[in-house]
Amino acid sequence: MKRFKRILERIVESILTVSGAVTTVTILLIIIFLFREGLGLFRSPAVEKGYALCVNSSNTVDHLNSHQIKEIFDYEIENWAELGGRDEAIEVFRFDEIFSRYTDEELGADYELLPDKLGEVITSSPGIIAFLPTQYLPQGMQGVKVLRSDRITPADFFGGRQWIPTATPAPQFGVLPLILGTLWVSIVAILIALPLGLGVAIYLSELAGQKMRKILKPTIELLAGIPSVVYGFFGLVVLVPLVQKTFGLPVGETGFTGSLILAIMALPTIITVAEDAMRSTPRAMREASLALGATHWQTIYKVIVPYAKSGISAAVVLGIGRAIGETMAVLMVTGNAAVMPRTLFEPLRTIPATIAAELGEAPAGGAHYQALFLLGCVLFFFTLLISVSAEAISKRNFNKGL
Amino acid sequence: MKMTIKNVLRQNRLSLSGMCNVRTAKKTLLTAAIAFVAVSANAQRIKGSDTCLPLSQQEAENYMKTVPSASVTVTGGGSGVGIAALLEGTTDIAQLSRKIKFDERQKLQGQGKTVKEVIIAYDALAVIVNPDNKVSNLTREQLEGIFTGKITNWKEVGGDDMKIVPYSRETSSGTYEFFKENVLKNRNYMNGIMSMPATGAIVQSISQTKGGIGYIGLAYLNDNVKPIHVSYDQGKTFVEPSVANAKNETYPIVRPLYYYYIGGSEATVKPFIDYVLSDAGQKTVSEIGFITVK
């Protein structure tokens, strides 16, 4: 009997160990997966995978960066002279146009004549730049020159100021506007939520009566249970017009609106954690303060708040964590315009909103897909930094006491 | 102090496990659904564009009423998702709000599959502005200027002195691609255009924003926004977006909605597609707010 019991215990123990190990390994695998997919971006060519750019061989330009390519295909740069070539008007040619110039019969049943026809088009026009699938590249033709292709560099990614992932042929993956957008919205949200949250926390722990507390605390915790898409809808229908009218703006979907919504969403976390910290002030400490003749208010801000300081810092950090990763509500109220944010009262775009909105249609394994994974890595670093600092703050309190 | 953080963490974990429960429940449901599909004799799956979603769902519902043995499952996700599913064989029909791309067709051919195309309906896109806006006519060139960021004030196109705020859909939307091809002639949208996650959000925002302009499916038009009359002939004739004008081909921003399936699977998919193209099926098309094929 005793022996059987011991075996059972062993089994339970090993199950627990295995489940712990499995969880750890899973998390590690997820992180490795995230980084592997993300870093693949720097092996992707600047021009869409499987495609190449061709020019007439008489053209003196033989290298273009991804920004120049985008400007050419947007008809912003219209002359080769602007790119250091001859004074010749640029003619943009997209692959699909071949089907309007030639019939399917002329191109052959399996498109075997397609490369020749493409070659003809390129040879006949000196100012042409053609965007073609590499599969149908006219090989070994006299008049055709294939442009050398760059890879996407970390400088393009982290320093770029344009996020246009669907631009063909050269998608623009500059994440600077997204990173700044995320930081701005989160930081302002905390600046709004902190005084408010602290006020409520002080009220709840020190001033509110027992009855009031019993009603207020569950209500605030209820706020944390509302789905974020509901907050988003509330923001879109109520806050957006409100912000627009109050500040007389052309649009109500701004970074500030996002901050407001995030502040509301971060409040329950801040209040709960800060209040817990304040209530854990030893009774002796309060009574000593009062016995020395300090008033109730003096006790609060000279004794209780300093005692709970690290708890409050932890509340702030957890609130920031909530704000930085929030997706749906922000997606609905910030306007999602990927511009470098100059003021808070303009539309901006955050990292989580970008991932949520774009991953659905990004072809798996493509550069856009990898760029979104890399954005995930950036976000991961932000939250990692936040959790580490939360840990450090709570530890400091533990060692020091008061 | 440590305790409180732990508490929060525990709460998070609790809510996480709650979510897992929901997920398992969903999974069970899904497996049940799949099992159901497998046993039923006349079963098929449709996946793809969110634009086609309400139409396909309604068609499937009506079809299952007329043919009780049939079972049709419809899911959305975006046009690209539909093609990817067709490629992997996880759907029988891919519904698309744009034509299949050249490289998507190449990929399917690479697997030795030929893809068959059926147009099931047409959808017209309406350009909308705030009802207080004076402007009611715009040419394609003006629209291109507005959405690429060359025209930034309403007074440049005959309106009040007011900033233009263009709204676009997210990049995952077939509507986004179609508008870019048809109206912007493949130029990119302006850097930092407002992009909204759903058509409903565009309507809501434009009804609130005086200088707003955006594009939506005709079926989503309501009184809170004003449709723009569009000209594709340099301003000679301006055409109002309406089902009648789309049908007689005077309204230019019209796109077909497609069903794609793999050649050889006709036996499974044909009855349903025939139903959609039948008079009863096309009646549903106009009820939903799309334009019939005939």
Image (cartoon, coloured by chain):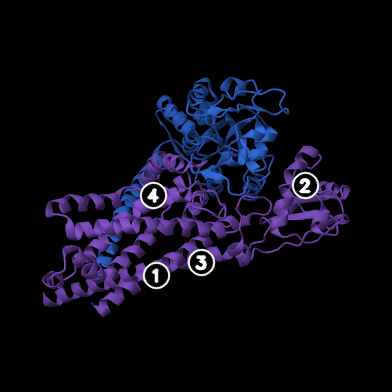
Any part of residue B115 in sight: no
Image quarter of residue B212: top right
| Nearest the eye: A106 or A383 | A383
Circles 1, 2 touching at the beta carbon (< 8 Å)? no
The percent position of residue A268, horizontal first and vertical second, equals 29, 55
The percent position of residue A11, horizontal first and vertical second, equals 23, 72
Which residue lies at the image location 23% right of the left edge and 49% below the top edge? Answer: A219
Q: Amino acid at mark 4?
A: Ile
Report which colour depicts chain A.
Answer: purple
Q: Which label is found at residue A35?
A: 3
Which residue is under mark 2? Answer: A92
Q: Which label is found at residue A188?
A: none
Query: Element under label 4?
Result: helix
Any part of residue A35 in sight: yes
Which residue is under mark 1? Answer: A25
Chain letter corresponding to the colour blue: B
Query: Element under label 3?
Result: helix
> Is label 2 or label 3 in front?
2
